[in-house]
Amino acid sequence: MRQVEEQEPGAFQTVELRARLLRATGKDREARELLQKYAEEKDAPLLAVAALLEELGEGAAAEPLYRKYAAVPDQPEKALFLAAYLGRRGRFAEALDLLEQAWKTCPPQAVAFTAVAMLHAPGARAEHFERVARDLETALAKNPDLVPVLLHLATLRDLQGRHAEAEQVYRRLLNRAPDNVVALNNLAWLLAHQKGKGNEALSLLRRAIDTAGPLPELRDTRAVVSLSLGESKAAVEDLEAVVREAPTATRYFHLARAELLAGHRGSALDALGKAKAAGLKAEALHPLERASYQPLLKELGRP
């Protein structure tokens, strides 16, 4: 650390390393004060310092820096970072008040991203969701071709559990952008959990793969569609490739389901073990597939 400080004494990376070292050795106050002092220097990267303070558990100390960063004249988009911070702190009403102004001065897709992202935070209530939904619909009424805003509206409806409305928004989006890979994938996912819609879902995924190639996200969704159709061989084939390339707890869970459907109990147990080792929890699954969690554990004899 001393060698780094001798070579680049004023660099943010150097201060960051020192702060992390202080934090790791239990010197939280010293770490906080180091970063606060550094933020007072001319041309200090306020956003980076604020984000680091927040990451180190010093959210209250980060707030003045976010506010100072957001107050830079003629750069209204910087206020979105303050709004996002307030959302992470559960101060949704304050954050949404800021965004009300941001809709007037910032690109709508940037405001939409910030607004919907904050709704993933614990404590967001129905009134916050509906307030954001109204803002998104207002933006779309002015410009129906704002594809990123349509995507965020569909995500919001999905978060609300209003899956039929999310489906309608994805279809609305695909009328304007037929090759939008995210919309094709997400609509296919919703259809996979509806009786009799599996073949339409596969058709959507073929279009997505033709456009973007066999991405792990697309093959994972295709495997879930195959499961809904009872096609275990196709599901296992996709998922084995997916977990080799980009393993996650959810994808191992899907593989366990596919292996069990194929009658491969040992492989299903192995995949479930890897899913749990990667942090699988029922609440982390999409609401539409949580119903399959406990039956799988029961079938495999796992708590």
Image (spheres, rainbow, N blue to C red):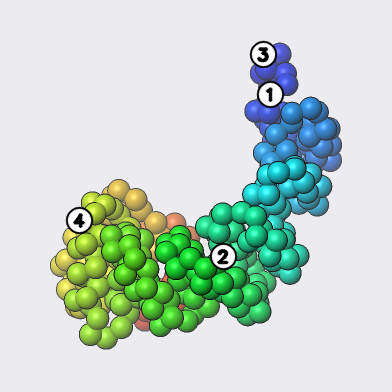
- Outermost residue on the bottom side: it is 195
Between the residue at mark 4 and the residue at mark 2, the CA separation in whole angstroms equals: 29 Å
Going by the numbered disc 2, the residue's amino acid type is: Val
Q: Residues within 10 Å of mark 3 (few under 14, many from 20)?
A: few
Question: How far apart are the alpha carbons under marks 1 and 3?
Answer: 9 Å
- The count of marks equals 4
Circle number at residue 263: none
Could you tell me residue 96's position as x and y percent? 69, 66
Q: Within 10 angstroms of label 4, few (less than 14), some, or many (20 or more) residues?
A: few
**Residue 59 appears at what percent x and percent y?**
76, 51
Horizontally, is 9 left or right of 261 in the view? right
Residue that mark 3 sits on: 7
Earlier sequence position, callout 4 versus callout 3? 3
Q: Type of residue at label 1?
A: Ala
Task: Residue at 75%, 43% (x, y): give it.
Answer: 73
Q: Which of the labelled discs sits on residue 11, or is there none?
A: 1
The type of residue carrying mark 3 is: Gln
For this rendering, which residue is in front, 71 or 65? 71
- Distance from Cα at disc 1 to Cα at disc 2: 34 Å
Which element carries disc 4, helix, strand or loop? helix
Q: Could you classify mark 1 by the number of other residues whose Cα lies within 10 Å: few (under 14), some (14-19), or many (20 or more)? A: few
Q: Earlier in the sequence, mark 4 or mark 2?
A: 2
Of the numbered discs in the image, which one, if any, rests on residue 116? Answer: 2
Residue at image point 37% right, 73% down: 172
Q: Nearer the viewer, mark 1 or mark 4?
A: 4
Secondary structure under badge 1? loop
The quadrant where residue 293 appears? bottom left
Q: Which residue is mark 4?
A: 210
